[in-house]
Amino acid sequence: MTIEKPACGAVRAGGMLPGMPPVDRDAFLLDPDVVFLNHGSFGACPKTVLEQQRELQARMEREPVHFYMRVLPELLDTARMRLSELVRAEPADLVFVRNATSAVNAVLSSLKLAPGDEVVTTNHAYRACHNALAHFAARSGARVVVARVPFPIRSAQEVVRSVESVLSDRSRVLLLDHITSPTALVFPVREIVALAEARGVVTLVDGAHAPGMVPLDLGSLGASYYTGNLHKWICAPKGAAFLYARRDRQEGLHPAVISHGLSSSRPRSRYWEEFDWCGTDDFSPALCVPHALDFLEARPGGLAEVMRENHRLALTGRDILLQALSQEPAAPDEMLGSMATVQLPLSGPALGSAFDVDPMQTQLFEQHRVEVPIFSFPEPGARCLRISAQIYNREAEYRALASALSALLAESP
């Protein structure tokens, strides 16, 4: 099915799409001439939060010694308390990190593996974290075992069965995505965590996309470790993420960078001391998390309504694309959050790394000013396109993407 392509001026008239209230789009620094449907990769931070960040940075520069030595611990504790309310976990079990990849590396580098041990993940795992798993496994002589989760997928139970089928008496660690990156699937983490932990397998959940997309209750989840990014769906500045470690898993856990916290004598937990200070850094992203939450909670209905509306818009956008491409849904609605992945009917090049960009993704941006990621999945050459939905997106943008895709596919041999 071919959809008539609208004129570029109609799509981006005045820098805005039809029906898009300026209060939403104008709250961000996003280029008004780009149809931005890729919030999932790096997020987007509201102007008001960035202003708060600049104030914190200025405060730091006015008296760096006073800020770092006397003020910072209390500011971190305040932000940590607000984070604990979001993820429903005790503050004592939470630390800030720069990103989820850093947290995964910290956990894996702290675990003791031996030759013959097996570390388990799925074929939907985020490439950077899979690389970390392979790296630390190779150093200890352990073996990476990959559970093949199908895509398209019919139900969440297919994920459970796939993971369960590869667990063995040699399994030591399970690295599990909460929401997958290339396929945008919400995995049934609670059921899988319970299954693995009951067998004595350490569970490390990569929840990079989860905070702000789905409700979290880490206190009852039961995972050994959980990490999530806050620069994505919480809209904090880049460099804000967290690591949760269950109380019985905190001893022996160290950040990837060892610093003063290892020998600190302050009356704070060693877990906090080591992760709160990994050397001189800009801590403003983590300190801005309360401001980002305030921004989202100020929306009608608060963050809960933002998540519901983003889910609804992601499904609407997916359906628009499916109709344009004559494709079927790749996953049931209940396995999606604020993103959705659709299969493209035209094969493409095998993308070897995250730094490779599909030529169709480049064409969409350069010729149609649409920013959206295209992945090579589930096998080399297969193409999947992932859309995101955030409060600044509108239905008309997905129609613009559908028109652009239709035009590019019509030009393909």
Image: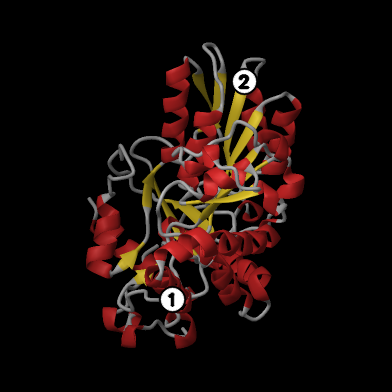
Q: Residues within 10 Å of mark 1 (few under 14, many from 20)?
A: few
Answer with left or right where residue 24 lies relative to residue 266.
left
Residue at 65% x, 17% y is 168
Mark 1 / mark 2, whichever is N-terminal: 1
Residue at 52% x, 54% y is 241
Tag 2's secondary structure? strand
Residue identifier under label 1:
55
Q: Is residue 306 visible?
A: yes
Label disc, if present, on residue 83 of the rendered structure: none
Q: CA distance from mark 1 to mark 2?
A: 48 Å
Which residue type does callout 2 highlight?
Answer: Ser
Of residues 411 and 146, the one nearer the viewer is: 146
Q: Is residue 152 above or below residue 373?
A: above
Q: Position of residue 2 (x, y in %)?
A: 36, 65
Q: Is residue 233 visible?
A: no
Q: Position of residue 31 (x, y in %)?
A: 32, 75
